[in-house]
Image: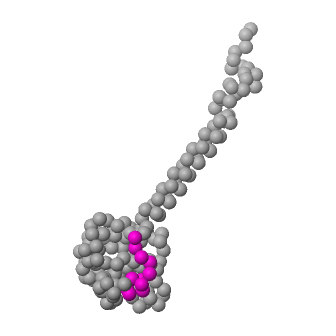
Amino acid sequence: MEKNESQVPADAQGPAVAAAKPGAPGRNDRWVKLGFLAVVLAVVAWVVYHQRTLTQLTDWGTDLPAALAQAAREDRPVVAIIYDSPTDYNYDRLQVVVKKEGNRKAMDKINAIRVTTRLSAADATKYGVTIYPTTLLFSPRGELQTAWAGYIGETDFRAYFLKGLRQER
């Protein structure tokens, strides 16, 4: 009587057949999984890095007193975004708003100096900043014209804020 292949133990069938059985991973499977995991981690790292670098306001200054002094010399208003954390959700959304073409053109039209910074507790009290982010508009003389607490949408940024109108509540 001839032995059926299913009756032969896995070791006797050879290493290729034993590795092909379900539940018995081969050496190559482990490397495929590790390679896939490495690719996924690399993509996640790339996305996080580019989200942080692409939304940063790189063409904005960071020194509010220097911007106010420059504004007085050049007779220009100052737009300042005050934040407490660069990873704050509303601050990230606000950066997207001010980077839009229409808002950049509106700030260029009024020839605004742009600043994004953190304030000391004393300066935050001086300018009435209680919520972050807060967007401030200063006159060329350094007087606070308007403050917008929290996130400001694209329409409100141009229609109210840049014209010096108060935040509607």
> Left or right of 21: which side holds 135?
left
Where residue 133 appears, as percent x and y from the top left, is 41, 77
> Left or right of 132: which side holds 5?
right
User: Residue, x 72% and y 26% (percent of image)?
Assistant: 15
User: Residue, x 47% and y 71% (percent of image)?
Assistant: 86
**Can you say whether 73 is above or below 115 in the image?**
below
Q: Which of the 4 image quadrants contains residue 105?
A: bottom left
Where residue 116 appears, as percent x and y from the top left, is 41, 76
Q: In this orientation, does residue 4 appear?
A: yes
Disc tally is 0
User: Residue, x 33% and y 73% (percent of image)?
Assistant: 152
- Residue 80 falls within the magenta-colored stretch: no
Q: In this orientation, does residue 130 appear?
A: no
Where residue 151 appears, as percent x and y from the top left, is 36, 73
Quadrant for the N terminus in the image:
top right
Q: Nearer the viewer, residue 44 or 18?
A: 44
In the image as oriented, which residue stretches furthest toward the front?
73
Q: Which of the 4 image quadrants contains residue 123?
A: bottom left
**Can you say whether 82 is above or below 13 in the image?**
below
Quadrant for the C terminus in the image:
bottom left
Where residue 80 appears, as percent x and y from the top left, is 37, 79
**Can you say whether 130 is above or below 108 in the image?**
below
Applied colour scheme: one colour
User: Residue, x 31% and y 65% (percent of image)?
Assistant: 100
Range of magenta residues: 59-69
